[in-house]
DNA sequence: ACTGTACCCTGTAGGC
DNA sequence: TGCCTACAGGGTACAG
């Protein structure tokens, strides 16, 4: 579900409620998500303030007054929903406007304000980890992680360096979080279409014999940044589960050029191709065989 | 070192 | 109606 634009949208939705808030009480309704919840999970959170709410790749990071960071990943179906006292009273204890099933409410954060932030995740591919904030970048989750695609480090030179000599195709190369961190199945397909690059093209074609970026690498950078920026502006893409922190759906699915559009006409002006679904590393990829080379 | 596959888990859609 | 299979935004542990 949540790729970078979705996680960033959730972050922006949670920030006004969470920033400066006290975690008055934390309920873990089961001992694990994808992995066991951190040792003494509630005790390490309760009574702390949230000093910052950041995003790194597809991770949400709450920096706490204790000096620890609570790192959260939404997996495929994780969602955070804010329940204010007023809304809870209006809607009833467990009525979600977004239709989430309360049986998958796994973690509940009760804030000093009386608001609750509920983590719901039917498939439980999400997880939460705690670590010292000062050591976050050295933690195995973040060490070796690729660049932020919307940061200054995503350049044609960087892509060329990472891709030099690599036989893997561009789909796999861009899905690999060690290269670019935050892209997922939707936005890789969309970015490759914008760049006019085939997902089957070997990554090494992003660099020339001297390891310098080719035209393909120069096309890829703005393709990635533009699709992510537009998706964030649209509040992300809602296929099924993904919702904003207030239960709203994203809108960027209306703007897909290729994703989930098998058999439809390529929307690129002047292109007469047809979008085809294919599979790379067991995941669906969508591309136009005419304008993506 | 790299690449591809199976797997974690639940829900849903489509074929019969 | 039910049963079965395939598939879904992610990441990881393996085998080769």
Image: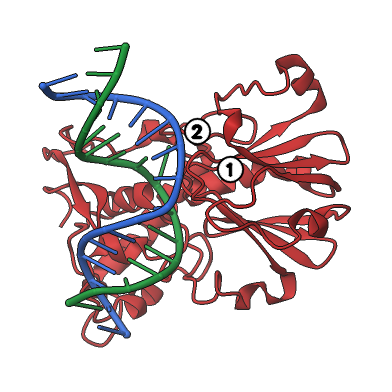
Chain colours: A red, B blue, C green
Q: Is residue A63 left or right of residue A146?
A: right
Q: Which residue in the protein does label 1 denote?
A: A9
Q: Which mark is residue A223?
A: none
Q: Circle 1 marks a residue in which chain?
A: A
Closer to us: A18 or A66: A66
Q: Is residue A137 left or right of residue A45?
A: left
Give the distance between the C-alpha atoms of the residues marked 1 and 2, in whole angstroms.
Answer: 9 Å
Are the numbered discs 1 and 2 placed on the same chain, yes or no? yes
- Vertical placement of residue A18 versus A86, above or below: below
- Vertical placement of residue A181 versus A76, above or below: below
Q: Residue at x 64, y 46 (%)?
A: A30
Callout 1 crowding tier (Cα within 10 Å): few <14, some 14–19, many ≥20: many
Location of the N terminus of chain A by quadrant is top left
Q: Which residue in the protein does label 2 denote?
A: A250
Q: Circle 2 marks a residue in which chain?
A: A
Where, by quadrant of the figure, is residue A112 drawn? top right
Location of the C terminus of chain A by quadrant is bottom left
Q: Are marks 1 and 2 in contact (CB under 8 Å)?
A: yes
Secondary structure found at label 2 = loop
Q: Residue at x 58, y 43 (%)?
A: A9
């Amino acid at each position: 579900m949540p790729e970078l634009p979705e996680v960033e949208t959730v972050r922006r939705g949670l920030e006004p409620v969470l920033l400066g808030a006290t975690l008055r009480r934390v309920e873990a309704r089961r001992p694990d998500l994808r992995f066991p919840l951190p040792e003494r999970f509630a005790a390490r959170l309760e009574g702390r303030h949230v000093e910052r709410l950041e995003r790194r790749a597809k991770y949400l990071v709450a920096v706490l007054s204790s000096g620890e960071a609570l790192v959260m990943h939404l997996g495929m179906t994780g969602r955070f929903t804010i329940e204010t006292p007023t809304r809870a009273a209006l809607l009833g204890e467990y009525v979600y406007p977004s239709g989430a099933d309360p049986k998958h409410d796994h973690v509940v954060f009760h804030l000093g304000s009386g608001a609750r932030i509920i983590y719901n995740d039917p498939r439980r591919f999400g997880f939460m980890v705690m670590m010292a904030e000062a050591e976050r970048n050295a933690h195995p989750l973040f060490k070796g992680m690729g660049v932020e695609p919307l940061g200054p480090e995503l350049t044609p030179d960087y892509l060329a360096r990472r891709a030099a000599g690599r036989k893997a195709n561009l789909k796999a190369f861009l899905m690999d979080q060690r290269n670019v961190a935050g892209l997922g199945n939707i936005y890789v397909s969309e970015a490759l279409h914008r760049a006019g690059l085939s997902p089957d093209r070997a990554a090494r074609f992003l660099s020339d014999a001297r390891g310098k970026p080719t035209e393909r690498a120069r096309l890829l950078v703005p393709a990635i940044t533009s699709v992510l920026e537009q998706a964030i502006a649209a509040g992300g893409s809602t296929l099924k589960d993904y919702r904003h922190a207030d239960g709203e759906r994203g809108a960027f699915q209306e703007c897909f050029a290729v994703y989930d559009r098998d058999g439809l006409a390529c929307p690129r002006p002047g292109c007469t191709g047809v979008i085809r679904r294919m599979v790379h590393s067991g995941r669906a990829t969508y591309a136009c065989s005419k304008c993506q080379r």
